[in-house]
Amino acid sequence: MRKLLITALSALAISTSAFAADMKVGFVDISYIMAKSPQRVAITEKLKGEFKEQEEELKALLDEYKKLQEKAQKDGATMSEQERIDMSRQAQEMEGKLKLKQNALNEDMKRRGQEEQRMLAGKIMEQINALATEENYDMLVNKEALLFAKPSMNVSDKVLARLGASGN
């Protein structure tokens, strides 16, 4: 019985090795592709343009807040108690507006950035699938799922080149 089990396992190992030898396998580093893609620069520029007006508003409000603080520090000694209280309230109000606008801008930028990232990830997946089909890969795996692979199995630069050639 034991010999039969050993023979069966040996046969399975040999057939698995023969099957694996016929497979074409590679891996991609999706993080690398996302970081190096030409679309990444376009996304950054697009988002800068989209939020330029809001950033300028925030900067103007910040400048106004700083001027108010400077005035309070400079003229504080000569102001009446009521003027100091009014200026303090005005500064607190401006600080609240600043924080609210900054948080809103950060959330909007994060949300839009994630939308653009998802679209880029979709384009990357399209190029990975096209490469796998055209070059007859049986399997392409994300590098993050690997424990070890020969560097020659990395097709990330091929995907990146295809992504650059697609231009969108």
Image (cartoon, grey):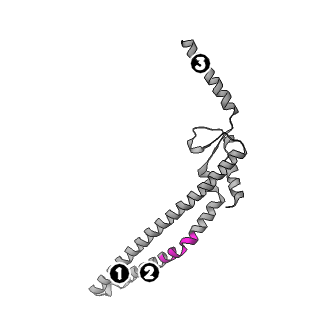
Residue 153 lies left or right of residue 31; in this view the side is: right
Tell me the kind of residue under disc 1: Gln
Can residue 113 be seen by looking at this rendering? yes
State the residue in front, 156 or 81.
Answer: 156
In 3D space, how far apart are the residues under numbered discs 3 and 1 (Cα atoms)? 84 Å
Q: What residue is rendered at 59% in x and 44% in y?
A: 143
Residue 106: x and y in percent read: 47, 66
Q: Residues within 10 Å of mark 1 (few under 14, many from 20)?
A: some
Residue 135: x and y in percent read: 72, 44
Which residue bears the numbered disc 1? 90
Which residue bears the numbered disc 3? 8
Looking at the rendering, in which quadrant would you find the C terminus? bottom right
Can residue 157 be seen by looking at this rendering? no
Tell me the kind of residue under disc 3: Ala
Q: Which mark is residue 64?
A: 2
Residue 164 lies left or right of residue 58; in this view the side is: right
Q: What residue is rendered at 61% in x and 23% in y?
A: 12
State the residue in front, 162 or 136.
Answer: 136
In 3D space, how far apart are the residues under numbered discs 2 and 3 (Cα atoms)? 81 Å
Q: Residues within 10 Å of mark 3 (few under 14, many from 20)?
A: few
Looking at the rendering, in which quadrant would you find the N terminus? top right
Question: What residue range appears in magenta?
Answer: 48-57
Residue 111: x and y in percent read: 50, 63
Q: Residue furthest left?
A: 81
Tell me the kind of residue under disc 2: Glu
Residue 54 highlighted magenta (yes or no) = yes
**Sequence-first tag of 2 and 1:** 2
Please report contact status of discs 3 and 1: CB closer than 8 Å, yes or no.
no
Nearer to us of marks 2 and 3 is 3
Name the element at disc 3: helix
Name the element at disc 1: helix
**Sequence-first tag of 2 and 3:** 3
